[in-house]
Image: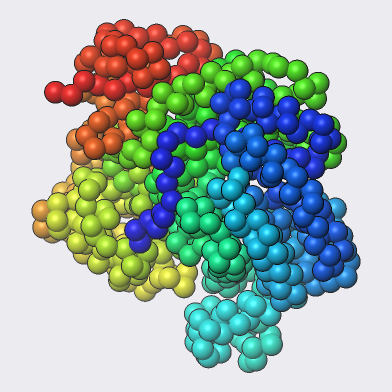
Amino acid sequence: MMQNQTFRFDKMTMGVCYYPEHWPKSLWREDLRRMKDAGISVIRIGEFSWSILEPRKGEFHFEFFDGFLDLCQEENIKVIFGTPTATPPAWLTETYPEVLNALKDGTLLRHGARRHYNYNSGIYRKLSARMVEELAAHYGRHPAIIGWQIDNELNCETDEFYSDADHEAFREFVRNRYQTLDALNEAWGTVFWSETYTAWSQVFCPRPVLNGGYNPHLLLDYSRFISESCVNFAALQAGILRRYRKPGDFITTNGMFGNLDNHRLQQEALDIYTYDSYPDFAFELDKKQNTSPDVKDRKWSRNLTEVRSICPHFGIMEQQSGGGGWVNRMEMPSPRPGQLTLWAMQSVAHGADFVSFFRWRTCTFGTEIYWHGILDYDNRDNRKLKEVKAFGKRLHSLDPVCGSDHVAAFALIKDYDNEWDARLDTVHRRFGKYSEAELFAASQLSHTPYDIVYLRDDTLPAELAKYPVAFYLHPVLMNEKREEVLRAYVEEGGTLVLGCRSGLKDMRGQCVMKPQPGLLQQLTGTDVKEFSAIGPDEEGDPDAPVWNDALTALPGTMVLRRYAAGYYPGQPCLTEKRNGKGRVLHLGSAFSQNMVRYLFEYTGILNLFAPYADAPEGIELVMRDKNGRRFIFALNYLPTEQDMVLKVPARDMFKGEKTEGTFTLPPYGTAVFEPEQE
């Protein structure tokens, strides 16, 4: 599915999140003027303001935001207004407890935090629609408004819903999907453990069961159901907003969270997608992070690559500006001098043309008193504000980069069915998470960047054709339509790289009764007759970790590597088969960094930047292209100086001067170069 983006920023734009309800009115004008002085031209407001707009059922009050928006217009500050459905007020949840989300055991999540509602309550959808309609009807023509944000962080805090309304909606979802109980029972394999359903009233969302022994096929459909519910809720609001907004105003929401088809969300509800980027989570103090020590905060480049697959020219609605934390969980250190700019420039490098910092000033009350903004409690100018001002000037110098496209050496193919299956299947999750983390680290450290392409039943081979190499790490779930797309890509000259367990299941999540890799066997030219996880005390092949499929090379298939140790020493672990103009490489294990680098070199894509620059591993290099003009971002993630070498003359975009040869990036420093055209 091609991206459906209907709005783009025409110049690099800097914003900030602001909550006028948190501050006395005497501060408003001063705040707006200080923002303008810092280079901020857009603010996001209102996403938690339902109790201000409708303090009692049916009583709508707009005086508060009328005054604030008129002041924004006077001060020439533009506004993105958030619909406030993430925080239903107390009168609503007490009057209609059926709107509340519930835990798996049925316990209702009561008023007092946020995101305590469910998407499928009929009364909540009705009251939300009325709230959005009143808001949009009143403010849709306001000259200060340039955009609308739907809700706030859909599926954040939780991406599971167990209210009575959800059980009813899930029952209807699977009834529409399967039509008959016989078809549902077959798809879910309910003959196992005597789970067979004889009436639709017996079908529920997952409920508490002994030892977590849930039906995996039900769980897979439940993930699909949650995504469907969320997209429908967003589309409900988007449809209302479109009736009232001014021409040119955009609709967005801020993501990206689990059990949600974000590509469908973008296609059906949004004009542009925005992301909330908090790289400081890599340094969170109250829990161990599952982040490679080689990448740390660079992991957010992986997240931004995901965002770019949804919307290639996206925005950042919340960009980290200070240390983060709630009073009851999470604690992150303050960004070190330079890191605020580094992380914001990381977003720009990967496709953001709008960067909005969270938040203007740290709140003095509530759960997020330790989630620090640009200004601190004392409201004085500080180092962070100085850094924001400097970033704003740098951002303005990058206006020629606005709207440019990321340049990738290869594609990483993903799909939501396998993403959701890997969350539910512990074996799939183990090698899936390992391989993607290792591929990302190898990509970062070898300066071999990638794009992500989500494979769907309506994906065309042309969407893959621009990439000479495509990794599809572990497509455990596979169907014929997707195999046909992969086949067409390869036969037209593409190189496809597959990992262990490929083709094991059908789209129901049931294992297929075919020789592995199932539907992909004709492409791979391999047969898997033996397989095993690597035991915790076993000394396996370090380049073939986690899981081993012992590959048999069928006629016409070449063996590239054999297992050096483990259960299958000497057996093929990496093969190559020609198909038309292209080839398929099949790895029988998870992907290690060493194996990924070998594959980069073998397929001829290693180090995209070799013609332009040499840089150490501590520097990330990113390239954007606009009508043949190329821009290279250099990001130093280390607390020490790093030298890189520019092999060709280039213009330093920040200084506006020509440079070549050795270039020194300060600790956490950033630079952007435009190489001279040949």
Q: Is residue 371 visible?
A: yes
- Work out whether residue 190 or residue 247 is closer to the camera in this orientation and state it: 247
Which quadrant of the view contains residue 222? bottom right
Residue 379, percent from left and from top: 77, 22
Which quadrant of the view contains residue 129? bottom right
- Work out whether residue 39 or residue 280 is closer to the camera in this orientation and state it: 39
Residue drawn at point x = 18 percent, y = 24 percent: 677
Residue 293, percent from left and from top: 52, 27
- Work out whether residue 615 or residue 39 is closer to the camera in this orientation and state it: 39
Residue drawn at point x = 38 percent, y = 13 percent: 655
Residue 603, percent from left and from top: 20, 39
Residue drawn at point x = 26 percent, y = 53 percent: 464
- Work out whether residue 107 or residue 34 is closer to the camera in this orientation and state it: 34
Residue drawn at point x = 51 percent, y = 52 percent: 249
Quarter holding the C terminus? Answer: top left
Q: Which color mode does the image show?
A: rainbow
Asked whether, in this view, residue 346 is left or right of residue 207, the answer is left
